[in-house]
Image: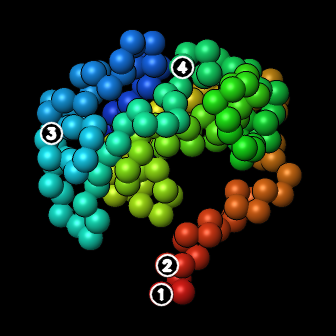
């Protein structure tokens, strides 16, 4: 994406905060970066944004941040299907997790508005977080291309099929 638009995209690399004893004390939760991590966002550049929904956070109540080991494990997956598989996620055997699962765990870790898919986009932190997810996917895709595996998955995952429409986009057309 950065190459396509000739502009850098800032991303939040959760692997930097993962090893902290208390990642809620990371500088990203200061007024200099993403603002406060609890309650309505009242500090930082995203404070008091206008809109229909007031973004709130409840960081570190559940879920997880992605670690370097998580990223290495997902990058080693042998196929697009395994990389993106929307399988159930439990904070136990993380070696079995897909990128989709690890991504979901961070949504839950952020809590508040970011947790449900219906309101997640109201918290601006989701944009640098998804830029990081896209970066990891770019690394995976590069590896797949180098190995001659450039085929889009033929497995029909209804919500992620080629040219598929996510269920929450359908509601936009019905309104």
Q: Which residue is nearer to you in this view: 9 or 18?
A: 18
Identity of the residue drawn at 37% across and 54% down: 113
Locate residue 158, reporting x and y percent: 76, 62
Q: Is residue 20 visible?
A: yes
Marks 3/4 in contact by CB < 8 Å: the verdict is no
User: For numbered disc 3, what is the local secondary structure?
Assistant: loop
- Tell me the distance, in whole angstroms, between the alpha carbons under discs 2 and 1: 5 Å
Q: Which residue is mark 2?
A: 172
Q: Which residue is mark 1?
A: 175
Pick whichever of labels 3 and 4 is earlier in the sequence. Answer: 3
- Tell me the distance, in whole angstroms, between the alpha carbons under discs 1 and 3: 34 Å
Marks 2/1 in contact by CB < 8 Å: the verdict is yes
Q: Nearer the viewer, mark 3 or mark 2?
A: 3
Q: Count residues near mark 2 (Cα–Cα under 10 Å), then give few for <14, some for 14-19, many for 20+.
A: few
Identity of the residue drawn at 50% across and 58% down: 117
User: For numbered disc 4, what is the local secondary structure?
Assistant: loop
Q: Which residue is mark 4?
A: 67
Q: Which residue is nearer to you in this view: 105 or 69?
A: 105
Q: Quick check: 2 left or right of 125?
A: right
- Tell me the distance, in whole angstroms, between the alpha carbons under discs 4 and 2: 35 Å
């Amino acid at each position: 994406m950065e190459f396509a638009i000739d502009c850098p995209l800032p991303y939040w690399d959760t692997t930097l905060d993962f090893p902290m004893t208390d990642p809620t004390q990371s500088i990203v939760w200061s007024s200099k970066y993403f603002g406060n991590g609890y309650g309505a966002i009242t500090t930082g550049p995203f404070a008091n944004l206008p809109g229909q929904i007031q973004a709130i956070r409840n960081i570190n109540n559940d879920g997880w941040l992605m670690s370097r080991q998580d990223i290495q494990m997902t990058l080693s997956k042998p196929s697009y299907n395994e990389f993106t598989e929307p399988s159930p996620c439990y904070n136990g055997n993380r070696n079995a997790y897909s990128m989709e699962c690890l991504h979901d765990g961070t949504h839950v870790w952020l809590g508040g508005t970011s947790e449900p898919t219906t309101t997640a986009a109201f918290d601006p932190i989701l944009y640098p977080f998804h830029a990081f997810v896209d970066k990891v996917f770019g690394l995976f895709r590069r590896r797949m291309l180098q190995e001659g595996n450039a085929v889009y998955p033929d497995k029909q995952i209804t919500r992620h099929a080629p040219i598929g429409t996510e269920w929450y986009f359908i509601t936009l057309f019905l309104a």
